[in-house]
Amino acid sequence: MENKQDEITVEVANESHVSYVQTILDTIEAAAKVRGTGIAKRSPEYIEQKMKEGKAIIALAGDQFAGFCYIETWGNKQFVANSGLIVDDKYRGHGLALRIKQTAFALSRTMFPDAKIFGLTSGAAVMKINTKLGYYPVTFAQLTDDEAFWRGCQGCINYDILTRTDRKYCICTAMLYDPRKHEDRLEIIDLMKKLKDKTQ
């Protein structure tokens, strides 16, 4: 693909995007196999629910699926995670993952302005994106203690490491953004304004 990022739309998903759910799940599973790393599995119903709740980001090149991410809240909405980030092979290497992640981050900040935003990742590219957004590496103990979140790791091939270490360590790196300690960057503030304008 040539540099056609302007032709790819990145937006908050809704009910009209439900037809892409299986493609999203297939793309996530294929990427996990290629990387040889774990990934928390989600059901089609779960992804569909996220779309209907306005808690997912989808990237489309015309009507072709290009990328996806969704947000989840934990610990009585004290924490938000941006999860399931995926970019289709055909659209990698052109900054699309950053655009998706920025939009998911802005959506998280808009919907849950006081929440800490966190993620677990084993990918260097995602760590780099998170750092640009203001995340910093932390210990697992600084993340949510919500058992429902940690149960989501059961579908990962590395789950035994997490349980053997009493949830202190794993292959993934934990990263956190605390709104009380950091200021949003200008591009995120602009995205937040656009998201608010669309919902008013």
Image (cartoon, rainbow, N blue to C red):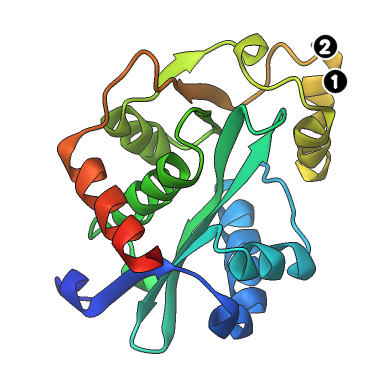
Closest to the observer, 146 or 130: 146
Mark 1 crowd level (few <14, some 14–19, many ≥20, 10 Å Cα)? few
Q: CA distance from mark 1 to mark 2?
A: 5 Å
- Residue at the far bottom in the pictured view: 63
Closest to the observer, 63 or 146: 146
Label total for image: 2
Image spot of residue 36 (x, y percent): 62, 45
Image spot of residue 127 (x, y percent): 40, 32
Callouts 1 and 2 close, C-beta under 8 Å: yes
Q: Is residue 54 left or right of residue 92?
A: right
In the rendered image, which quarter is residue 6 located in? bottom left
- The three-letter code of the residue at mark 1 reads Thr
Residue 33 seen from this side: yes
- The three-letter code of the residue at mark 2 reads Asp
> Residue at image x 31%, y 18%?
182
Residue 113 drawn above or below residue 163: below
Image spot of residue 65 (x, y percent): 45, 78
Secondary structure, mark 2, is loop
Which residue is tagged 2? 166
Secondary structure, mark 1, is helix
Which residue is tagged 1? 163
Q: Is residue 23 left or right of residue 166?
A: left
Closest to the observer, 43 or 11: 11
Mark 2 crowd level (few <14, some 14–19, many ≥20, 10 Å Cα)? few
> Residue at image x 68%, y 70%?
48
What label sits on residue 9 in the rendered view? none
Q: Is residue 121 left or right of residue 45?
A: left
Placement of the N terminus among the 4 image quadrants: bottom left
Placement of the C terminus among the 4 image quadrants: bottom left
> Residue at image x 32%, y 26%?
134
